[in-house]
Amino acid sequence: MKPTLLKIPFEFGGIEDSIYPVVIEDEASGARILVDAAYTGFLEKLETALREAGVAPESITHLLITHQDHDHMGAAADFKEKYPQVTIVAGADEADYIDGSQKNLRLAQAEAFQAHLPEAQKSFGEAFIAVLKAVKPVQVDRRVTEGETLFGWTVLETPGHTPGHISLYDAKMHAVITGDAFALESGVPVIANPQFTLNLEMAEKSMARLVALEAETYYCYHGGIWSAQ
Ligand SMILES: [Zn+2]
């Protein structure tokens, strides 16, 4: 069964944008896996997007978090609190940042940048740090690694954007869920926020690896659907 693409529109600083979480369904087991959980405070928006796509939030069995960024795990703790049946899944190398046992790397990066920001950007930097500090950690119930299968989907470790970033591949459906291994800009794959990418060389390799799969459908969290064919 094809994954369901959700669209969550929002406005930030006068700019309209959307993020695209995905729901995977496994008919055999009845599992419904939500991939990525939107920004902090977005629980209602996420629930609305699910319902509009015909998916009852109560029916979600798993929440897979591709990586620790606030736009992917921001509403995860609230979702788990409201729907405690959900099993939280993340990459083994990313889980400690998601459950809060290690300091969030984006926050550490923003704090390190702050001292070097030009005066005019300091208040923006401080606001961003406050946003990152507001992210609630969430317990990871299942840690996955390269090659593991999750309801027919293969876990691909795609580090670079963050060290433990994961993507998903379904060889039968010829589909990839990229997370932020790449994003779309004007319909073209690009490195997501290269200036904040923790390891650009690794990120380029990860993106190249996914593109080389020549999948029929790529589900990009930033940008929506792309096809290599
Ligand atoms: Zn993102």
Image: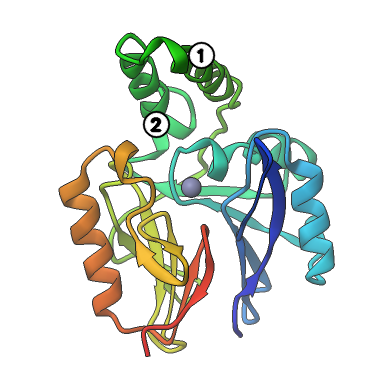
Q: Which of marks 1 and 2 is nearer the N terminus?
A: 2
Q: What element carries label 2?
A: helix
Asked if residue 30 lies left or right of residue 137, the reply is right
Question: Looking at the image, which is closer to me, 226 or 164?
Answer: 226
Q: Taking 64 as reference, is 22 above or below it?
A: below
Q: For the residues labelled 1 and 2, say whether their Cβ atoms are less than 8 Å apart.
A: no
Query: Does any atom of ligand 1 lie closer than 8 Å to the CB of label 1?
Result: no
Question: Looking at the image, which is closer to me, 127 or 44?
Answer: 127
Q: Taking 228 as reference, is 123 above or below it?
A: above
State the quadrant of the C terminus.
bottom left
Residue 154 visible in the shown view: no
Q: Residues within 10 Å of mark 2 (few under 14, many from 20)?
A: many
Most extreme residue toward the left is 201
Image location (x, y in percent) of residue 119: 41, 9
> How far separated are the C-alphas under marks 1 and 2?
25 Å
**Amino acid type assigned to the residue bearing label 1 in the image:** Glu
Q: Which label was assigned to residue 96?
A: 2
Q: What element carries label 1?
A: helix
Give the quarter of the image for residue 228.
bottom left
Image location (x, y in percent) of residue 142: 47, 48
Q: In this figure, which residue is indicated by the disc labeled 1?
A: 126
Residue visible at 67% across and 58% down in the picture? 61
Most extreme residue toward the front is 120
- Report the mark closest to the observer, 1 or 2: 1
Q: Taking 173 as reference, is 63 above or below it?
A: above
State the quadrant of the N terminus.
bottom right
**Amino acid type assigned to the residue bearing label 2 in the image:** Asp
Residue visible at 51% across and 39% down in the picture? 140
